[in-house]
Amino acid sequence: IVEDARYPLKYRMLVPMVDVIFADVAQPDQARIVALNAHSFLKNGGYVVISIKANCIDSTVDASIVFAREVKKMQEENIKPQEQLTLEPYERDHAIVIGQYRPGSK
């Protein structure tokens, strides 16, 4: 992304619709940032892969609570979680969540 990912309309004319969004933004509002970009660029049925760094979001609670909150935020934005993996022992308090955007009925 060539601009601040919080403002997808600033680069909408430069980026086409995509099948996958990978996000490693390490911001407290990263679920919202991913959702904004999914709404602008991700095809229905496409996927998001988000790297969640718990301490960047809330260092006062257990990482598992942060992960659960972020997954809930994703669900509220029509992103259905498919898989969640913690990165222990390689990275402490980190997880990868894969979700499908506006999944179609099969």
Image: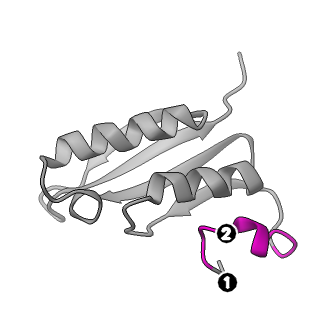
Q: Secondary structure at mark 1?
A: loop
Q: Is residue 50 above or below residue 72?
A: below
| Quarter-of-image position of residue 54 | bottom left
| Residue placed under numbered mark 2 in the picture | 7
Closest to the observer, 49 or 29? 29
Residue type at mark 2 is Tyr
Residue 59, by quadrant, is bottom left
Picture quadrant where residue 102 is located: top right
For image coordinates 23% across by 56% down, the residue present is 58
What residue is rendered at 25% in x and 46% in y? 66
Q: Which residues are magenta?
A: 4-14
Residue found 12% across the figure and 46% down from its top = 62
Label 2, residues with CA under 10 Å away: few <14, some 14-19, many ≥20: few
Identity of the residue furthest to the top in this view:
106
What residue does disc 1 label?
2
* Tag count: 2
Q: Is residue 79 magenta?
A: no
